[in-house]
Image (cartoon, grey):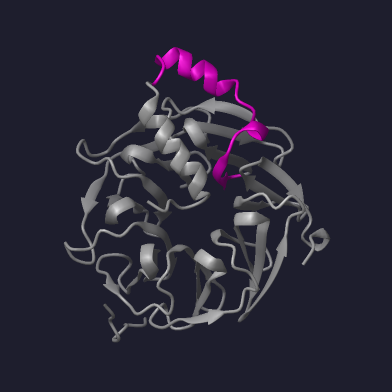
Amino acid sequence: MYVCTNIGSVFIKSLGLILCVAIAQGAAVAAPPAAALAQLQTRASIDKVAIIDAAYTGKRMVAVGERGLVFISDDQGKTWSARSSGHEKAITGVVALDAKVVLATGHSGLIFRSADGGQHWSGSRPLENMHEAQLGVHVLPDGRVISFGGYASLLESSDGGQSWTQRKILGDAIDKHFYGMAQIGASMVLVGEAGLIATSGDAGKTWASVDSPYPGSLFGVASMPGNIFIAFGMRGKILYSADMGCSWQELDSGTTSPFFSATSLKDGRLLLAGKDGVLAIVSGRAAETRYTPDRRSVARVLETDNNTLLLFGEAGVRRVQWQRLRK
């Protein structure tokens, strides 16, 4: 285990413009009755809405996005069917605990849960006084789940997302947004607004800030084989750590477009995705950057069984082959 000794001192994750629009819409438009909302949501087409995140739950894919929309696919993304979340707020993140239990985070402090692989959902605000947007959720090997988001909000669940406890980390004065979290064994890294990087050596029980080589927002962090952490964010920044997050070096990405998400590929490499259709594969200390032909922003990428890449974002979902993308 590494212990960091050099302790240093709303842009919304994943398609920030889309989410900011969703905030304004949610505040200005009254929610329709439950039955009417369910009817509207189940008639939605995935190719006509903004998708903010997607994940596998077993063999099934679950995609989430603006206005509380949820879609599922059982054929590797060839066809999609819409499901109702029961709420109209933007859903910002989704993760599977197992083949059945799926959790999702949303605006206004909402957390969504499905016990049947995304078919049916219940959404609620775990804490009555919490209205900060929840921007992501991380599942720990011991079964605990952490939800994180705006203004340093952090919630923890030990029962698969059925109940939550609020936590305060990094001191009472911090109010930066938390955007991403990753883990290698008991070592964890949390990144966020204004270059925030924090580490934990005890599986999230205690946290400490570390120095960041970049003062701009970091929208995510991921782990790679070889005990490597990769953080990414504004202006195409990619940061590399080989000592469990204690120190960071910048990798040359060849772009100034921000990165929103990271996907671990089957071969161990990491695929970053972001604004302007930018995609970058990180291998070792090198990054190869390419762009989609339409330059539309990509919020999340899933890899299919035949190595096709599904791109989720402002254009719904698209299918591409890495080798056919231009540099």
**Which quadrant of the figure contains the C terminus?**
bottom right
* Residue at the far bottom in the pictured view: 5
**Which quadrant of the figure contains the N terminus?**
bottom left
Residue 158 left/right relative to 118: left
Q: Nearer the viewer, residue 269 or 192?
A: 192
* Residue at the far left in the pictured view: 172
The picture places residue 210, in percent across and down from the top left corner, at 33, 78
Any part of residue 268 in sight: no
Residue 255 left/right relative to 166: right
Q: Nearer the viewer, residue 23 or 323?
A: 23
The picture places residue 99, in percent across and down from the top left corner, at 53, 42
Q: Residue at x 43, y 83 (%)?
A: 243
Q: Which residues are magenta?
A: 31-58
The picture places residue 2, in percent across and down from the top left corner, at 36, 83
Q: Residue at x 42, y 64 (%)?
A: 217
Q: Residue at x 33, y 67 (%)?
A: 203
Q: Is residue 55 magenta?
A: yes
- Among the 4 quarters of the image, the one containing residue 23: top left
- Among the 4 quarters of the image, the one containing residue 111: top left
Q: Residue at x 28, y 53 (%)?
A: 151
* Residue at the far right in the pictured view: 324
In the rendered image of this protein, does residue 74 appear above or below residue 165? above
Number of numbered labels in the structure image: 0
In the rendered image of this protein, does residue 119 appear above or below residue 62? above
In the rendered image of this protein, does residue 285 appear above or below residue 105? below
Any part of residue 191 in sight: yes
